[in-house]
Structures are given as structure tokens and as C-alpha cells.
Image (spheres, grey):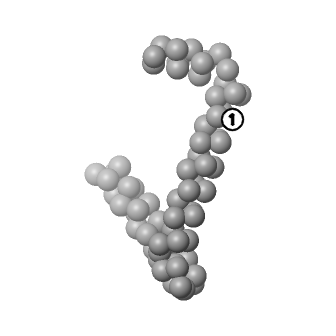
Amino acid sequence: MWRKFNELKRHHKIGFGLLLAVAVVSFWRGVWGLSDMFLFPASPVVSYVASIVIGAATILWAHYIMEG
């Protein structure tokens, strides 16, 4: 299975790139919709600020893990 996957990746780079782009956008759309529904749904401003804080903390945490 991985062999076929690697062959697809090597021979069809544009198609593989488009497939990955659709996957990323679909995932992001799902996460965005869920956060709109469950992360402070009554207060959009608080939801946006909480999302920024969670995202920044995750990026800083990942950077710390990668460096250490």
C-alpha cells in the first residue's frame, strides 16, 4: 500500500498536491465549524480571543518541544 502511495506521490505531484490541499481545507472547515458551535457560542469575541490564545500556546509549545 505504501509503495503505491509513494509512486502516486512521485508521478503525479500536481494531483497529489491538490488532493492534500483539499484535505487540509476540509479539515480546517470542520474544525472551524466545531469551534463556532462549542467554543463560547454566545460570545463571538471571546471565542475568537480564546482561539488565538489556544493557537499561540500550541505554536509556542510545539516550538519548545522541537528545540528541547
Amino acid at dot 1: Leu
Q: Nearer the viewer, residue 50 or 23?
A: 23
Give how far across and how far down residue 66 sits, in percent: 35, 49
Residue under the image location 44 percent in, 60 percent down: 59
Q: Quadrant of the N terminus?
A: top left
For this view, does 8 lie left or right of residue 14?
left
Q: Nearer the viewer, residue 33 or 17?
A: 33
For this view, does 10 lie left or right of residue 64?
right
Residue under the image location 64 percent in, 28 percent down: 16
Residue 21, located in which quarter of the rendered image? Answer: top right
Give how far across and how far down residue 54 sits, in percent: 43, 69
In the depicted structure, whether residue 58 falls above or below residue 65? below
Residue under the image location 55 percent in, 71 percent down: 36
For this view, does 2 lie left or right of residue 8?
left
In the depicted structure, whether residue 56 falls above or below residue 4? below
Give how far across and how far down residue 49 sits, in percent: 52, 79
In the depicted structure, whether residue 43 falls above or below residue 24? below
State the residue lying farthest toward the left. Answer: 68
Give how far across and how far down residue 37 sits, in percent: 52, 71
Q: Which residue is mark 1?
A: 18
Q: Nearer the viewer, residue 6 or 63?
A: 6
Say if residue 49 shows up in the picture. Answer: no
State the residue lying farthest toward the right. Answer: 14
Task: Bin the neighbour count of mark 1 within 10 Å (Cα to Cα): few under 14, some 14-19, many 20 and up.
Answer: few
Residue under the image location 57 percent in, 63 percent down: 32
